[in-house]
Image: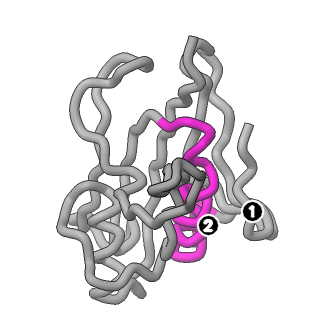
Amino acid sequence: MADVFELNIVLNLRESLSDEELAELRWHLGLGPQPEILRIVAEFPVVVADDAGEPAVEDYPAPLLGQHGDAWKVNGALTSVLLRPEDPTNGAWALTVRQEIHPDQFDGIAELLTWLSIKADDRHRREAGTVHLGWIRFYESDRFEPLVVRDGEVAWP
């Protein structure tokens, strides 16, 4: 048994993304190189053993939604795509993500999802303080749960 979730994001983003934000988002999606300075998610703490064998926290930046290829547990393909739609009335950027994630990754991914919710097109704001980003499901379940950011917090299942 594994603690794996399928994460699906289908989101239109507003025009207001800076070049730096786009570069960092592309990196998180596995679509570009790591920027020199990370601002969206600035810390990637990992517990490692130091020289004395004691636990120590070190920073190991890694793309949060950058898996591409065969899925391990949820079947199908993992991907992340960011593009400009042909019809700009649908938002300045179209984002589609399908990833496998572990609960240990929820904190870092929550930072990125919260940032995405701020940049989301208004059509994703269906009620006050809530932004709908997509869906999530436990890999053994056939039922998807809404993936929302409510009042600046990701509502994990």
Q: Secondary structure at mark 1?
A: strand
Q: Looking at the picture, which amino acid does disc 2 mark? A: Thr
Q: Position of residue 153 (x, y in %)?
A: 74, 62
Residue at the spot of label 2: 114
**Precedes in sequence: disc 1 or disc 2:** 2
Residue 52 visible in image: yes
Label 1 – label 2 distance at C-alpha = 7 Å
- Against 98, is 123 above or below? below
Q: Nearest the camera: 46 or 18?
A: 46
Q: Looking at the picture, which amino acid does disc 1 mark? A: Glu
- Against 95, is 14 above or below? below
- The structure residue drawn at horizontal position 50% and vertical position 31%, both measured from the top left corner, is 6
Q: Nearest the camera: 135 or 113?
A: 113
Our reading of the magenta stretch's main secondary structure is helix
Asked if residue 147 lies left or right of residue 153, the reply is left
> Image quadrant of residue 20?
bottom left
- The structure residue drawn at horizontal position 36% and vertical position 17%, both measured from the top left corner, is 75
Q: Are marks 1 and 2 in contact (CB under 8 Å)?
A: yes
> Image quadrant of residue 89?
bottom left
Residue at the spot of label 1: 153
Asked if residue 33 lies left or right of residue 54, the reply is left
In the rendered structure, does residue 109 fall within the stretch colored magenta?
Answer: yes
Q: Which residues are magenta?
A: 101-124
Residue 120 visible in image: no
